[in-house]
Image (cartoon, rainbow, N blue to C red):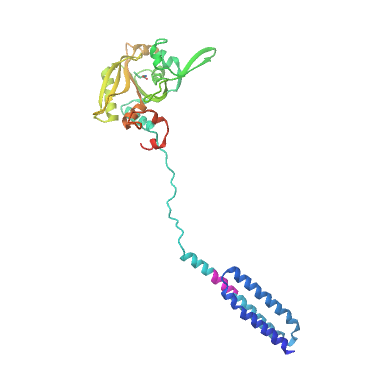
């Protein structure tokens, strides 16, 4: 009968000896599998406890407990060792490179035409001109009639545009996409008395469409009205302005020309050393008929006005040319980022 105890002890020893398997388990999963197998073996052995005589149960119980605790210690020890190994492998393995440069957003920038516009406005503001705004859709009266264009004057053909006719309380009103910023002369002078010195930039629209003309382009209008204003003032202001924009090397030439709203009228060309003359703006002394239309007395005041293409200024300033080297205004409006980011 003593054999049952000896058998059980031997069995427990066998389980304890197999505990060495836990020490060698290569992974947490294998460790848990091996542990489960040992636990099963242990409970099978424990079933035999009931056959152990009472007076020896304490002794056997002690032995069972020792095996249990031993297995537990090995299991925990191996589990910890496996975790340590994994951590060490991670630390000594290849580094995770967190130093890659981030993806910086490409900031936008101002369009070259806008940049030139700001530059031109800065110069005129430094000379004491104020900046006014005018609408792109204006009346036929502000665009032509009040500026002294006779009805159906051929000059309106030169400035053919997009007409919009609507009625205002039953009366037909012709509005149009303005063909020039000279509309602002009428608007500003009608609003207040002289003296005034104003510049006004904005988009204008014409039927023209070729390499150096776009159906939409930008102008900068300027005018000054006071007593005793002469053509010498006009020449002085514009020459100074052009030298500031293009540098002191620029040659400036005033050429007689015709616009219905000035008398005398001129066109101004500029030339860089070694290059061709380029027409850059129209100007002249404000015609008495314009003063009459805005309620100024042409006997008391005089003034000058000028209008220039901002896009043209940008073309000359930056030398905007197409692949063949010819000036091309269209490049400015195609929004090709390769072109725009070269400024
Ligand atoms: N408005 C004229 C044009 O667009 C330019 C101009 C303005 C001429 C002011 C004289 C005076 O062609």
Can residue 203 be seen at all in this image of the molecule? no
Specify whether 96 is left or right of 45. Answer: left
The quadrant holding residue 249 is top left
How many numbered marks appear? 0
Q: Residue at x 34, y 13 (%)?
A: 287
Asked if the magenta segment contains residue 79, the reply would be yes
The quadrant holding residue 227 is top left
Q: If the picture is divided into quarters, which one holds ligand 1?
A: top left
Seen from this angle, which residue lies furthest bottom?
Answer: 2
Q: Reply above or below: 77 against 56.
A: above
How far across and down, in percent of the image, does residue 289 sit? Answer: 36, 11
How far across and down, in percent of the image, does residue 275 sit? Answer: 26, 27
Q: Reply above or below: 287 against 276.
A: above
Q: In the rendered image, which quarter contains the N terminus? A: bottom right
Specify whether 121 is left or right of 176. Answer: left
Specify whether 12 is left or right of 290. Answer: right
How far across and down, in percent of the image, does residue 188 sit? Answer: 40, 20
Q: Reply above or below: 22 against 4.
A: above
Asked if the magenta segment contains residue 87, the reply would be no
How far across and down, in percent of the image, does residue 80 sit? Answer: 55, 71
User: Which is the main secondary structure of the residues drawn in magenta?
Assistant: helix
Magenta residues, start to end: 75-82
Q: Residue at x 44, y 44 (%)?
A: 105
Foreground pick, 63 / 324: 324
Can residue 284 be seen at all in this image of the molecule? yes
Q: In the rendered image, which quarter contains the C terminus? A: top left
The quadrant holding residue 268 is top left
């Amino acid at each position: 009968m003593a054999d049952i105890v000896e058998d059980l002890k031997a069995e427990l020893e066998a389980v304890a000896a197999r505990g060495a398997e836990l020490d060698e388990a290569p992974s947490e999963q294998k460790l848990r599998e091996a542990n489960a197998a040992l636990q099963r073996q242990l409970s099978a052995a424990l079933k035999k406890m009931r056959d152990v005589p009472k007076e020896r149960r304490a002794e056997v119980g002690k032995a069972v407990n020792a095996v249990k605790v031993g297995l537990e210690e090995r299991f925990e020890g191996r589990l910890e060792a496996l975790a340590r190994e994994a951590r060490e492998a991670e630390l000594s393995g290849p580094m995770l490179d967190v130093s890659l440069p981030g993806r910086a957003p490409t900031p936008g920038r101002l369009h070259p035409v806008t940049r030139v516009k700001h530059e031109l406005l800065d110069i005129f503001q430094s000379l004491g001109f104020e900046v006014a705004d005018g609408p792109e859709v204006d009346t036929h009266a502000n665009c032509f009639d009040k500026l002294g264009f006779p009805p159906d004057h051929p000059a309106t053909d030169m400035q053919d545009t997009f007409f919009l006719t609507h009625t205002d309380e039953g009366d037909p009103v012709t509005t149009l996409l303005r063909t020039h910023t000279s509309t602002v002369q009428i608007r500003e002078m009608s609003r207040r008395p002289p003296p005034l010195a104003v510049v006004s930039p904005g988009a204008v629209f014409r039927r023209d469409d070729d390499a150096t003309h776009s159906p939409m382009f930008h102008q900068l209008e300027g005018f000054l009205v006071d007593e005793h204003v002469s053509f010498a003032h006009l020449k002085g202001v514009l020459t100074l302005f052009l030298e500031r924009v293009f540098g002191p090397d620029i040659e400036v030439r005033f050429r007689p020309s015709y616009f219905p709203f000035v008398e005398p009228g001129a066109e101004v060309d500029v030339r860089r050393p070694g290059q061709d003359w380029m027409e850059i703006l129209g100007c002249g002394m404000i015609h008495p008929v314009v003063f009459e239309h805005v309620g100024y007395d042409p006997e008391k005041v005089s003034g000058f006005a000028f209008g220039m293409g901002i896009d043209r200024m940008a073309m000359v300033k930056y030398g905007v040319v197409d692949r063949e080297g010819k000036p091309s205004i269209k490049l400015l409006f195609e929004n090709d980022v390769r072109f725009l980011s070269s400024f």
